[in-house]
Amino acid sequence: MPLIATPQSMFFEAPLALQSGASLRAYHLAYETYGTLNADKSNAVLICHALNASHHVAGVYEGQDKSEGWWDNMIGPGKAVDTNRFFVIGVNNLGSCFGSTGPMHAHPDTGEIYGADFPVVTVEDWVDAQARLLDALGIQTLAAVMGGSLGGMQALSWTLRYPDRVAHAVVVASAPNLTAENIAFNEVARRAIVTDPDFHGGHFYKHGVVPQRGLRIARMIGHITYLSDDVMNEKFGRELREAVTHNATGYRYSTQDVEFQIESYLRYQGDKFSEYFDANTYLLITRALDYFDPARTLGGNLTAALAQATCKFLLVSFTTDWRFSPARSREMVRALLDNKRDVSYAEIDAPHGHDAFLLNDARYMNVVSSYFDNIAKALTAGGAT
């Protein structure tokens, strides 16, 4: 029997103070839970999502085909994060377009759609909102907080903002901040969106249009960075599209036609993305990625920044992930070890690039499974995790 997921929503009236100095009042958080919270509420695991994911982490929606959660290979009964032993919580971040309050929703005071007026949110703001949700659920301490990519940044932030509420942090394919190259990729993607004539300064909802051209390009740029060169060569190489007319040389010699398979694939990904993702949400989330830097106010001293963390850590990286390279994970490992923290680290030799954190690599799954197995055993024994 598949795990059946049930979307939930919680309303918060009290204002949430944001890092920007603004505040957000009267907002909803969409979330899902899987498994059963034990009597002393000590087996909760919070899953933080990356850019285009949501609270739908695991399982399927009843009666809906192909509705698996985005980390369903990782989370569920008998899986690495076993919902027979853990109470798993997935939360959709504020500013997203999958249920939590965001740019597509109405301002509670004016009744007007927020659009570009939705306040800028940061990783720290998301963590604060998640903490409020846990408060409402009666959960004081997390057995673990876990995330990949941007989700890993949130997991790291949890250990700094609420060190007494986290026993373990699992940070996968992530970094303590973005490199200049990463910020550059995000900026090019944002410019593709804001220069789309249908963007209308972020208030395109009023005009009944969607800046799909910009969203398509943004997704194409992003998707290139998620894959490794080896994977792209293996999947597509220099193959031409099928069912097209070529001359004797094998080419049509066009600057505008879709000629190669990789071009066709990227356009397909862009088209699909532009049909469901909100343009303002893309701007907000990529900017949150850019801003995250816990060592910024400490002169870039990551060791000093991570001194606040007291929990145990598992960090995982992938050799061909050039967007969040193993070197960035090793920076965090070194800083944590400098603080004499309990750290486990796995560097997986996988060919899939950044997307590897979402895929079924047996070595990766075994590392995570073993780590959570030890957490579960400690909980059962009633000792410290």
Image (cartoon, grey):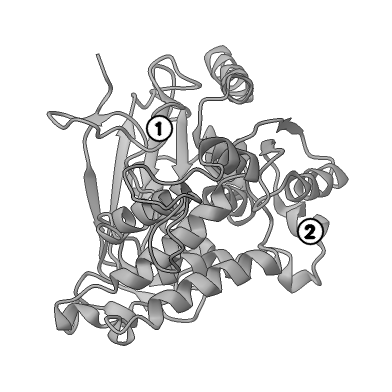
Residue located farthest toward the right when viewing the structure as drawn: 338
- Numbered circle sitting on residue 88: 1
* Above or below for 63 versus 297: above
Q: Amino acid at mark 1?
A: Val
Neighbor class of circle 1 (other Cα within 10 Å; few <14, some 14-19, many 20+) is many
Residue 111 appears in the picture as rendered: no
Residue 327 appears in the picture as rendered: yes
User: In the rendered view, does 381 fall on the left or right side of 16?
Assistant: right
User: In the rendered view, does 27 fall on the left or right side of 110?
Assistant: right
The part of the image, by quadrant, that contains residue 67 is top left
Q: Amino acid at mark 2?
A: Leu
* Above or below for 98 versus 187: above
Q: In the image shown, does 182 or 108 lie closer to the viewer?
A: 182
- Numbered circle sitting on residue 302: 2
Pick the quarter of the image with the C terminus.
Answer: top right
Q: Secondary structure at mark 2?
A: helix
Q: Residue 302 appears at what percent x and percent y?
A: 79, 59
Question: How far, Cα to Cα, is label 1 from label 2?
Answer: 30 Å
- Numbered circle sitting on residue 137: none
Look at the numbered discs 1 and 2 and tell me whether their residues touch, using CB distance below 8 Å. Answer: no
Marks counted in the figure total: 2
* Above or below for 116 versus 377: below
Residue drawn 57% across the image and 17% down it: 373
Residue drawn 67% across the image and 39% down it: 311
Q: Residue 101 appears at what percent x and percent y?
A: 28, 64
Q: In the image shown, does 79 or 320 lie closer to the viewer?
A: 320
Neighbor class of circle 2 (other Cα within 10 Å; few <14, some 14-19, many 20+) is many
Q: Earlier in the sequence, mark 1 or mark 2?
A: 1
* Above or below for 77 versus 356: above
Q: Residue 108 appears at what percent x and percent y?
A: 19, 76
